[in-house]
Image: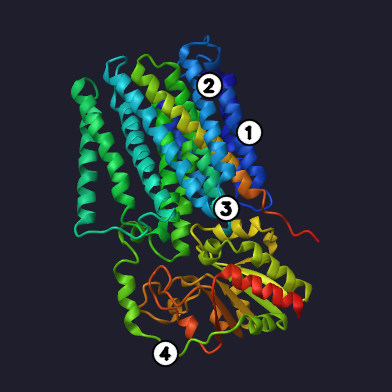
Amino acid sequence: MSSTIALIIIGVAVLFIIGIKFLSSPKTARAGNLVAAAGMLIALIALHKPTGDYVWSQGWTCNYTLIAVGTVIGLIIGAIGAYSVKMTAMPQMVAMFNGLGGGAAALVASLEFLRHAHGVEDVTAATTIPMLFATLIGSLSFSGSIIAYLKLEGKFEKPMTFPGQNFLNGLILLVILGLCGWLTFNATGGNAVTAFIVMFSLALFFGIAMVMPIGGADMPVVISLLNSFTGLAVAADGFAINNLAMVVAGTLVGSSGTLLTLLMCKAMNRPVTNVLFGAFGSGGGTKAAAGGVAGNVKPIQADEAALLLAYAQRVVIVPGYGMAVAQAQHQVRELSDELGKRGVEVQFAIHPVAGRMPGHMNVLLAEANVPYDQLIEMEQINPSMDRVDVCLVIGANDVVNPAAREEKSSPIYGMPIIEADRCKSVIVMKRSMAAGFAGIENHLFYKDNTRMLFGDAKASLQTLITQLKAS
Amino acid sequence: MDTNVLFIFILAVFVGFEVISKVPSMLHTPLMSGTNAIHGIILFGGILVLADAATPLARVLGFIAVVFGSANVFGGFMVTDRMLQMFKKKKK
């Protein structure tokens, strides 16, 4: 590698790091994404083969036509996906792109492995291990992401479990690792190719088996984990084909993705092992609900709710997944504007795991033009909840359940919540009295200061807005 | 060369951890989406193996890798930008 190329790669690495850094602050986030994209473009233009030859000056062969056509097809697929997806379906889209990246990583590693298996070059464990690693991690990220995508689309959303599942999965993993161990030292010849294909297929199957038992509500954590997996697979590919830019980019994604996964689990107060192997919501969740709750549910009509809101000084809105499902974010913004005109101070309390993905609520409310300084994170808003006149809970359930604080036997005990129950009065907008994802009764609904506004969130909000405008 | 790459790998692990340690939860989704786009650099891997592909099988698999990688990198950056363009300050 010439020193000019080395310098360019260093510059690209710096652009990636700055890009990720900028992505972690609201003011610079958009610029950060563009900085990373610029780094990618520069690296693409400067792409060199492992031998040191410049990729784009090798004479135009049939392979280059395939590269051009493939890139354009990918670009079109990506653009259609990126610009047609609804904001509520964003998590699925990220899962899908991540799966494609994982699949590409597995294919690149496989091609390298097969080339070496046919004895083109000398093989050592140092070159084989990264290829096997990238194949294994890339293919399970591919199949796992597709299952995550389907689960978020509402297909087989419930966890699928059977006795001995973790044992069986462990056994499959053991076989995969055994094959990889054998292949590390026997990487040439027909047997190696057969063993490799078996390993590849088992890894694809393992990705499915790993994600199937996990419930739809935990998919964000799974996607984040698979995202970091793909990063590591890409880094391993970089090792295998001697491309430094790939090593740096893949590793940055791998480590930041791992940290992000841990941060998400921390927000739910659950260890990552519990998410992956606990099959939450199928067993423990329903048992604890039997305790029963004292008190009555008190419904409220829209006109009364509108009055309550209109004469409040400070209103806090707690959005949840129900708002996303009802596509009610624009009505929420309109209501907030209407209240603002009357001099009511309106804030949004954002639970870190509300919705289907951390930050999901922020994205939806941003789409509806709610300024982000009106969105307050849970830790910041909780201390002042006593001084809130009306707390409007829209389609949120488990994240406002005081059982997390009060009831030791509850499966969500210890999860940080938005303390809506401390507000002077609470209006909960909800379709019916059905329990939330975790299958737990929500004590908030039975509190003396809570009133329930039943119905579709969008329709109810529309009525509230009309009432407010009329009065 | 190999130990050098390993050295860079270890440093990148720490940088990756350090650089996002203070991200607010409101940016978790865009951050995940943005890093997702960055691992789309696998497109390069696809290009490199396809450029040297010698058999029909290698061409087919390499071609699929390029399509996947390209969708990952372009789609990833575009979808992240679409998300982030909505994060605006309050206009008064």
C-alpha distance separating marks 3 and 4: 39 Å
Residue positioned most to the top: A59
Q: Please state if A288 lies on the left or on the right of A403 as rendered.
A: left
Mark 2 vs mark 3: which is more N-terminal? Answer: 2
Which amino acid, by three-letter code, is at mark 1? Ala
Which amino acid, by three-letter code, is at mark 4? Ala
C-alpha distance separating marks 1 and 4: 59 Å
Q: Is residue A254 visible?
A: no
Question: Are the residues flagged by discs 4 and 2 in contact, CB closer than 8 Å?
Answer: no
Q: How is the image coloured?
A: rainbow
Q: Compared with residue A109, is residue A340 higher up or lower down, i.e. above or below?
A: below
User: How many discs mark residues in the rendered view?
Assistant: 4
The chain ID associated with circle 3 is: A
Residue A38 tag number: 1
**Residue highlighted by disc 4:** A294
Q: Residue at x 22, y 45 (%)?
A: A172
Q: Residue at x 58, y 80 (%)?
A: A427
Mark 4 vs mark 2: which is more N-terminal? Answer: 2
Pick the quarter of the image with the C terminus of chain B.
bottom right
